[in-house]
Amino acid sequence: DAKTTQPTSMDCAEGRAANLPCNHSTISGNEYVYWYRQIHSQGPQYIIHGLKNNETNEMASLIITEDRKSSTLILPHATLRDTAVYYCIVRVSGLSGAGSYQLTFGKGTKLSVIP
Amino acid sequence: DAGVIQSPRHEVTEMGQEVTLRCKPISGHNSLFWYRQTMMRGLELLIYFNNNVPIDDSGMPEDRFSAKMPNASFSTLKIQPSEPRDSAVYFCASSQTSWDAEAFFGQGTRLTVV
């Protein structure tokens, strides 16, 4: 299984871009990078995922390096409601093979958005 | 869709009692996951179902834990007998079974065993 490494915590000023890094140097060619976040006392929430190309949706942008060994999640204009733990996850294949799906969560990065 | 629905939201029980947690996945999703979250161990995958069949239960801590999915719209996680160390937040999640499907999580059940 590819493992991920994230900083334990980060601060970001409200209104500024939050850039959350993730290292996944042992990622395999067919493994996706996923980002989820967990706001206090809630269930994890999907943000974005990608394989090789950079991705953007209404919540965030995902920048994946060409060698795929690291990625950065960008929240373009952080708000106080973005304060949460952000998890970078590399999807592992389940025991049943193709089409199976598991998410293994690490410790994540606690992002604090400061007024 | 109302999302993944878990019940109860909070459960307090005495050591030795049986506890049953319930989950209703999103309609049309055919993968279902049970996770446990504690301060010490973070989010741990307990068991994963695909099309109502348990695929991987290697995360189930011991025989006191069991999970069932009798149909596509309902799953249970049972602990019998419960112990104080089982106190945690238990999350259920569901997804479509596709190569890159996102998982949707419920709000969790906070279990306290005294």
Image (cartoon, rainbow, N blue to C red):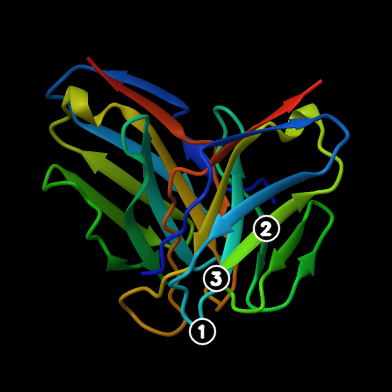
- Which callout, 3 or 1, points at the residue further toward the start of the chain? 1
Name the amino acid type tagged 2. Answer: Thr
Q: In the rendered view, would you say B89 is above or below B45?
A: above
The chain letter for the residue carrying disc 3 is A
Picture residue at 16% right of the left edge, 26% below the top: B83
Residues tagged by mark 3 and mark 1 found on one chain of the structure: yes
Check the residue under mark 1 and report the chain it is in: A
For mark 3, give the secondary structure. Answer: loop
The residue nearer to you, when weighing B93 against A82, is: A82
Disc 2 target residue = A72
Along the viewing direction, whichever of A6 and B108 lies nearer the viewer: A6
The disc labelled 3 sits on which kind of residue? Lys
Q: Is residue B28 left or right of residue A24?
A: right
Q: Which residue is mark 3?
A: A69
Residue under label 1, please give it.
A29
Whole-angstrom CA distance, mark 1 to mark 2, is: 18 Å
Assign the N terminus of chain A to one quadrant of the image.
bottom left
The span from disc 3 to disc 1 (Cα, nearest Å) is: 10 Å
